Image (cartoon, helix red, strand yellow):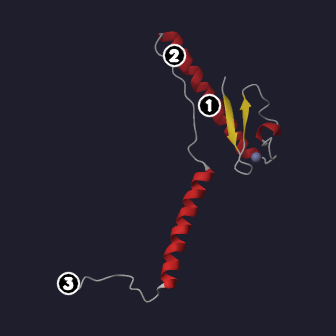
Amino acid sequence: MGMLRIHCDYCGQAWEVYHRDEWNGDSARTCPHCFSEIDPATWEKVVAAFAEMSDANIELAKDHAQTHGALFWVDYLEDYTFQDRQAETLTDIQNSLEDLRQLIQAPEAPMFVYDRAE
Ligand SMILES: [Zn+2]
């Protein structure tokens, strides 16, 4: 049986919820490190998605048992990490600030340089 690993941006920690755990209780959707909570309605969507993925893996195992073909199973790994997006945003802001700083320090500098070599 599978499990979910839930990442909390608030404290930077993660926790795991196993198939055997009490999914409808508040503890499963609460970060055990900082006690931040996932919205109950959103948590229901997480549970439904987990159940669908778990069912799909059971079907893959059945296919394997019936056909004696390869056994497949699927893990879902999220590529969204707030830290990466924040770093991207910070880099964008730093670049914009650098452009602005250069403009302020040399306001007389032309924005465009025309080629007068004709
Ligand atoms: Zn947390």
- Where does the image place residue 23, in percent across and percent down from the top left? 77, 33
x 68%, y 36%: residue? 5
Task: Tell me the residue that label 2 is attached to.
Answer: 63
Q: Earlier in the sequence, mark 1 or mark 3?
A: 1
Which of labels 2 and 3 is toward the front? 3
- What is the crowding at mark 2: few (fewer than 14 residues within 10 Å), some, or many (at least 20)? some
- Where does the image place residue 72, in percent across and percent down from the top left? 51, 21
x 51%, y 14%: residue? 64
- Where does the image place residue 117, in percent across and percent down from the top left? 20, 84
SS assignment at label 2: helix
Taking depth in this image into account, of 4 and 34 the one nearest to the observer is 34
x 28%, y 83%: residue? 114
Taking depth in this image into account, of 82 and 95 the one nearest to the observer is 95
Whole-number angstrom distance, CA of label 2 to CA of label 3: 73 Å
Which quadrant holds the C terminus? bottom left
Task: Tell me the residue that label 1 is attached to.
Answer: 52
The amino acid type, in three-letter code, at marker 2 is Asp
Task: Tell me the residue that label 3 is attached to.
Answer: 117
- What is the crowding at mark 3: few (fewer than 14 residues within 10 Å), some, or many (at least 20)? few
- Where does the image place residue 48, in percent across and percent down from the top left? 67, 35
Q: Earlier in the sequence, mark 2 or mark 3?
A: 2
Q: Is residue 79 left or right of residue 43?
A: left
